[in-house]
């Protein structure tokens, strides 16, 4: 099983934010699925491209082929509350996010945690280019 470092503002493993689509294909091979600007690799390694064909968001689902580590910790393997507390050591999450509880957006890190139900661990961890996640104000 491969291990990929999750590096906010940089990328995930061998894929850097703002990398070209062609370079992603050279590193990861042909995508298993293409849906609009999202391409799927390795059964759960998702790469979203901007209008210029550059990586703008990378999301890792928990998978059997790889593990994603943030500061040496696999956030998929922690209970959700522990994962939020761990990432909170490095930045604050947006407490006004509309899907808070399901999604935690760490704006300064441009990192997201997502789960489909509240009684689960996080199913996806993502990193994005600067400005992808904007802070929300109360009432937005």
Image (cartoon, helix red, strand yellow):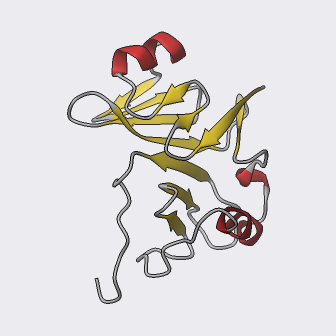
94 with respect to 12 (left or right)? left
- Number of numbered markers: 0
Determine whether 45 is above or below 120 in the image: above
78 with respect to 124 (left or right)? right
Picture coordinates of residue 99, whole percent (x, y): 46, 74
Picture coordinates of residue 43, whole percent (x, y): 59, 30
Quadrant for the N terminus in the image: top right
Picture coordinates of residue 70, whole percent (x, y): 69, 47
What is the quadrant of residue 96 in the picture? bottom left
Task: Identify the residue at horizontal 55%, vertical 47% (top origin).
Answer: 8
Viewer-closest of 59 and 6: 6
Determine whether 117 is above or below 132 in the image: below
Task: Identify the residue at horizontal 78%, vertical 44% (top origin).
Answer: 72
Determine whether 59 is above or below 28 in the image: below
Picture coordinates of residue 65, whole percent (x, y): 71, 28
Task: Identify the residue at horizontal 38%, vertical 50% (top origin).
Answer: 130
Viewer-closest of 99 and 12: 12
Viewer-closest of 80 and 5: 5
126 with respect to 38 (left or right)? right
63 with respect to 38 (left or right)? right
Determine whether 51 is above or below 89 in the image: above
Quadrant for the C terminus in the image: bottom left
Viewer-closest of 62 and 113: 113
């Amino acid at each position: 099983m491969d291990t990929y470092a999750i590096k906010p503002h940089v990328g995930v493993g061998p894929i850097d934010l703002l990398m070209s689509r062609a370079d992603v294909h050279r590193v990861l091979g042909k995508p298993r699925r293409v849906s609009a600007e999202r391409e799927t690799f390795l059964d759960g390694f998702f790469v979203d491209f901007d209008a210029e064909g550059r990586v703008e968001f990378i999301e890792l689902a928990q998978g059997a082929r790889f593990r994603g580590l943030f500061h040496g910790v696999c956030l998929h393997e922690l209970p959700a509350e522990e994962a939020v507390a761990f990432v909170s050591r490095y930045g604050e999450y947006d407490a006004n996010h509309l899907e808070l509880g399901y999604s935690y957006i760490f704006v300064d890190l441009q990192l997201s945690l997502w789960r489909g139900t509240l009684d689960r661990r996080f199913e996806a961890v993502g990193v994005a280019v600067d400005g992808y996640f904007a802070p929300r104000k109360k009432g937005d």
